[in-house]
Image (cartoon, rainbow, N blue to C red):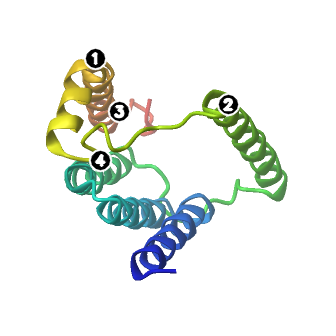
Amino acid sequence: MTGVETAFALLGLVAVGSGVLVVTSPQLVHAGLWLAVSLAALAGCYLLLTAEFVAWVQVLIYVGAVIVVVLFALMLTRAPTGPSAESSVARRAVAAVVATATAGVLLAVLQAGFAGEVVDLDAVEVGGATATGGALFRTWVLPFEVLSVLLLAALVGAITLSRRAPDHEGSER
């Protein structure tokens, strides 16, 4: 194994390990911070794959902006940020079954969709700003804009929910 392959494997282990910590962390704020670690490790993987533009977009957009929006929304909605007493073993078992089924379906779809496919990497510029920008603004501009509007709506909803005044009995609506 070369040094690049070793670094890629280590970054992959960090990404997967912190991803596991995201879903198993009992505190939401810690889960958000582990998500930032996972996304940063993924950006490192992009760098090792010579996709510098994608790596820096990953750092700026996801690690920088999305994690801040997620943590900001958590704080605004007054969500319980500590360990939850409602997370029982039965709920975790159901979540594990659903996660395993989802992973199985995803792997089956990927295998069926890409079985026997060969991508000629010599014919295209991989990871550069020209190729990535062309794909983003030709093919993916509508989903990208829809996602940005959904994130904005979620943030406005969080602010609206956090600004509600208590009713006459002192409890919240």
Name which of mark 1 and mark 2 comes first in the sequence. Answer: 2
Q: Mark 2 points at which residue?
A: 109
Q: Residues within 10 Å of mark 1 (few under 14, many from 20)?
A: few
Q: Name the mark nearer the viewer: 3 or 2.
A: 2
> Considering only vertical position in the picture, is 47 above or below 142?
below
Tell me the tag on residue 66. Answer: 4
Q: Mark 1 points at which residue?
A: 142
Q: Where is residue 167 in the image (x, y as percent from the top left)?
A: 39, 30
Identity of the residue furthest to the left in this view:
130
Q: Name the mark nearer the viewer: 4 or 2.
A: 2
Name which of mark 1 and mark 3 comes first in the sequence. Answer: 1
Q: Which residue is drawn at 40% across and 60% down?
A: 42
> Considering only vertical position in the picture, is 146 above or below 109?
above
Amino acid under disc 1: Leu
Dot 4 and dot 1 residues touching (CB under 8 Å): no
The answer to which of 144 and 30 lies nearer the viewer is 144
Q: Where is residue 102 in the image (x, y as percent from the top left)?
A: 71, 38
Q: How crowded is mark 4: few (under 14 residues within 10 Å), some or many (20 or more)?
A: some
Element type at marker 1? helix
| Placement of the C terminus among the 4 image quadrants | top left
50 vs 106, left or right, is left
Q: Residue at x 32, y 53 (%)?
A: 67
Q: Name the mark nearer the viewer: 4 or 3.
A: 4
